[in-house]
Amino acid sequence: MIESLENTPEEPVIAIMGPTASGKTALSIEVAKKLDGEIISVDSALIYRGMDIGTAKPCEKEKEGIPHWLIDTHDPSESYSVSAFFDDTLRLVKDIRQRGKTPILVGGTMMYFNALVKGIASLPKGDLDVKKAIEEEAAKKGWIAMHEYLRSIDPECAHRIHPNDPQRITRAIEVHRISGKPLSWWQDQTPKIAPFKLYEFAIAPENRSDLHERIAKRFHIMLEQGLVQEVEKLFARPDLNRNMAAIRSVGYRQVWEYLEGSLNETEMAERGIIATRQLAKRQLTWLRGWSSLTWLDTFDDERLAKLLAKIAR
């Protein structure tokens, strides 16, 4: 049984999903203008301040006066969880509705959308002291050893979490140390679900080669706009390293490796484009498993009309 947060559901909310570089931002602005909406970002990288170029963060001109939420909310040294996104989104949807506006969820972080659609486990709140102790232990022993430790206390989670994913390893161990129960136990409990209906749309080019071309073109534009200089500022900070969630973002990791000297400029650009295409492939894989989606073509001039017609039914 799924536990609802409210006895009566909120009015519908629009969700615009899609792979990177598919045109989600432009479509969301069109929808927001048409429906008097406000946009909630569903993107795990747009939350970070000082990471603008590589995330294709919309500037004030591109926003066209439309309020945007969950952008520039965190420093790159901070972490942000699916659970935090879930709670923030419920609060924002309620606030937007109280203003008489239409909430529009836009982005490509499929785990976030999945939490809204399928629900999320109620987990213990994080403890900064516990988290710091785990990170200090990892600095001495290494993340492979921490992953093996996780396997000893929560084999189910260890099977799902890659040894090179320090953020998720830390959280799984943190939950166990705070509560005395493994993360997998918490995830098996009755989840909480979003108290509103989603009108779910996905946008992408019909031809994958068109998406690949858009990705390559956009990455080169980012380099021209100063992506390397943007990452240099992050690279110079002693509190940041390549294992942090923000720095592992597509594009940032490759430029970081270039600044470390392990890649030359050509290799950096090639790997950045490849990594972005791989991200798009993973996003499309998620979306193809979604049963309630309405697909829109990036290059279809009627995409806005089709979206509005679906909502009006």
Image: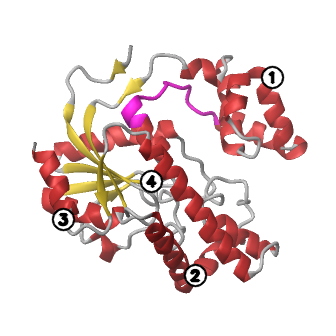
Foreground of the two, 271 or 95: 271
Numbered label attached to residue 223:
2
* Marker count (numbered): 4
Q: Horizontal and vertical percent for residue 99? A: 16, 48
Neighbours of disc 4 within 10 Å: few (<14), some (14-19), many (20+):
many
| Callout 2–callout 3 Cβ contact below 8 Å | no
Q: CA distance from mark 1 to mark 2?
A: 44 Å
| Callout 1–callout 4 Cβ contact below 8 Å | no
Q: Does the stretch in magenta take in 302?
A: no
Q: CA distance from mark 3 to mark 4?
A: 22 Å
Which residue is at 68% across, 54% downward? Answer: 244
- Look at the image and give the residue range highlighted in magenta: 115-127
**Disc 1 residue type (three-letter):** Ser
Q: Could you tell which of marks 3 and 4 lies nearer the N-terminus?
A: 4
Neighbours of disc 2 within 10 Å: few (<14), some (14-19), many (20+):
some
Neighbours of disc 3 within 10 Å: few (<14), some (14-19), many (20+):
few
Foreground of the two, 272 or 168: 272
Q: CA distance from mark 2 to mark 3?
A: 32 Å
**Disc 4 residue type (three-letter):** Gly
Q: Secondary structure at mark 4?
A: loop
Q: Could you tell which of marks 4 and 2 lies nearer the N-terminus?
A: 4
Residue at the left extreme of this rendering: 312
Q: Which residue is mark 4?
A: 108
Q: Secondary structure at mark 2?
A: helix
State which mark lies toward you, 1 or 3. Answer: 3
Q: Does the stretch in magenta take in 123?
A: yes
